[in-house]
Amino acid sequence: MHSVVCIKQVPDSAQIRVHPVTNTIMRQGVPTIINPYDLYAVEEALRVKDKVGGKVTVISMGPPMAEQALRKALSFGADRAILVTDRAFAGSDTLATSYVLASAIAKVAAEEPVDIVFCGKQTIDGDTAQVGPGIARRLDIQQLTYVAKLERLDLDKREIAVQRRAEGGVQVLSTKLPCMITMLEGSNEIRFATMDDMFRAARANVEVWGADTSGVEDKTQCGLKGSPTVVKKVFAPKPREEKAEMIESRDKAPAEIAASTIEVLAAADPALAAEFGPRPPAGA
Amino acid sequence: MAEHFDAIVVGAGPAGSAAAYTMAKAGLSVLQLERGEYPGAKNVQGAILYADAVADLIPDFREEAPLERHIIEQRMWMLDDRSHIASHFRSENFNEEEPNRYTIIRTQFDKWFSSKVREAGALLICETTVTDLMKDEKGRVVGVRTDREGGEITADVVILAEGVNALVASKAGFAPTPNPENFALGVKEMHFLPQDVIEQRFNIGEDEGVVIEAIGTVTQGMLGTGFIYTNKESLAVGLGCMVSDFAHSGITPYDLLENFKQHPSVKPLLAGSEVKEYSAHMIPEGGYKAMPKVFGDGWMIAGDTGQFVNSLHREGSNMALTTGKVAGETVAALKREGKPMTEANLARYRQTLNDSYVIKDLKKYRELPGILHRNKQFVTTYPQLMSKAMESWFRVDGIDKRTKEKSILKSFLSARSFTGLIGDAIKVARAIR
Ligand SMILES: Cc1cc2nc3c(=O)[nH]c(=O)nc-3n(C[C@H](O)[C@H](O)[C@H](O)COP(=O)(O)OP(=O)(O)OC[C@H]3O[C@@H](n4cnc5c(N)ncnc54)[C@H](O)[C@@H]3O)c2cc1C
């Protein structure tokens, strides 16, 4: 059983600063993390390995510093890590990214057949959810998106069944291997690495593949050249005009504040107030 | 797979990284364990960095380390609620080829420093907390336990550089249970402003920086100081007071900082800024008398864990760097000589420190913490008296100068009495002699 997990290093959105003057995102000094959705993919691949044995390879396309993310994936228990990095890949949109990643996975598969490609549902910095399906399409394998649970894995029949979260319900889908799966948030919880794995990751060599070594055949399909998507404008949406109502709380007892808050809510929604019945007078 | 190293360093702050760097450079196998996500993730400092201690380790650090501004001006403020009396020292001599003090942002600096440690060959493992020391039947330290499965790792020597909150050292019985009188709690905010606004407001050029240290009624009777440091595009604004004083007064650090920011002398400096970060951290301020024993069979203590902070001069990071370096050098020398890491051999660490500025300075101010604890008038009465005196002196209002002098003197005498004034002068002299 060989799984490949695609991960992306992203800025920790909880710690991003917007430059007060230019309104641009300040990336300097912002810690980076593994895209949180990808952690579910890593964990699921490791669980499959725990259950049926085999190997987990992690791949990331990104700048050289994405090596940290791969090393971290190794510490969780992945066996092999490949960083696909080249100036030629810079500026790739989802079309170009899925082309590069699919090329690299094809190269991995040529050495060692791949059974499942795991991806996160989407990234927190792009939010497109297009790269996983793009990879599946290019590798011409089945795709199972928004997967909440792996139900069954039958290696003899080479069949997998999953629960897929769909609008209004859960679908149980099964397909033949190899396939591509994108994992949903909350589907599992990333493990706490063992000391041995921490040592292994700290000492491991992360393989680095460039444009000439990552299996990419057509360089015009990578980077800016291969990216038809154009970002025309980035802007912060205007705050809505509606005004908040301020309830003065200074020098007031908690009960008083609560009572005046209820007054205000009741005034705004008489139906709700009626449902709650009579209230004690404010200040009581 | 049991791992063994020449040395294990607990913590990747300045003390731990200085120790790991020194030993790795000397060719030892070094494991450094840090509980934060990355070095610097958990560390708080004002932060003034003293170049000398860094250059001692990495002479050309100025070329690559992330530094904010070099300090050309020091302002000492004495505040009452509405005024401040200040002494400023500014010198073109501080615009030298190799400046002496810099503001830094610790998360960035620690990360950079740690990259040097790894280049030197030490193995760094983050997100791993040392929970305990491993000892043999004779009580000698032989390794550490971590919070991870299979987390027992052995080494010839363990250097504890876990910072002020010395949980591992306390658990092992090497550091006493913390006494609130020996620790300050510092709170700090980062206020972002455009670079040119900072430079105009503080009357400085590009890369030049200002330090403001403030004492007075802003600490509301508690022993402590406030500070404002200029970074490139931000101001670090903070306050630190003794933990015991916070406990007695019931004042919350956050409220205290809010008040400091509202002070009429502070507010205009921060106007229009955007607050992006709030942090709190302890500072060991017990000085020489609170220092634990810093070495034993198979272990040494460096940095804040050993109370190596000169609170009067706000020197902590440099002492951390120096103690870490000396600890590392001690281990490297013993290795070279083929000697074991026994208490008797590691005593060399303390001897070397005795001859350095670290112990000399801590000794010099050994009475300071005690005297200040017992004499809060230095942060309450005096700033108020001085402000009143200054105000009356500068106000032109038809009252003759002799009368003003007399009433100023009277205000001092009635607040502190003649013997009180003399006594205070002696106390100050004793504390900083
Ligand atoms: C508000 C404030 C302002 C200050 N201003 C200045 C200043 O301007 N100039 C100055 O020189 N000094 C200043 N100091 C003091 C200075 O920050 C410290 O003296 C210095 O950081 C001490 O370095 P250290 O390496 O001993 O500890 P730390 O920097 O605290 O590093 C300890 C490291 O150990 C890690 N650790 C702790 N426990 C464990 C464990 N069990 N397992 C693994 N890792 C662990 C921590 O995560 C941390 O990274 C200031 C301090 C504060 C709080």
Image: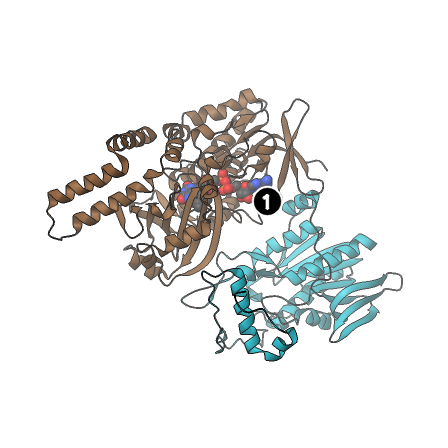
Chain colours: A cyan, B brown
Q: Is residue A1 visible?
A: yes
Q: Is residue A247 left or right of residue A148?
A: left
Q: Residue B323: horizontal and vertical position, in percent?
A: 47, 33
Amino acid residing under circle 1: Arg
Q: Is mark 1 within 8 Å of ligand 1?
A: yes
At 38% from the left and 38% from the top, the residue drawn is B52
- Vertical placement of B164 versus A34: above or below? above
Closest to the observer: B221 or A203? B221
User: Of all residues shown, which one is farthest toward the right?
Assistant: A156
Q: Quadrant of the C terminus of chain B?
A: top left
At 41% from the left and 55% from the top, the residue drawn is B258
Q: Is residue B91 left or right of residue A87?
A: left
Which quadrant of the structure image shows residue B297?
A: top right
- Vertical placement of B168 versus B66: above or below? above
Closest to the observer: B366 or A36? B366
Which quadrant of the structure image shows residue A49?
A: bottom right
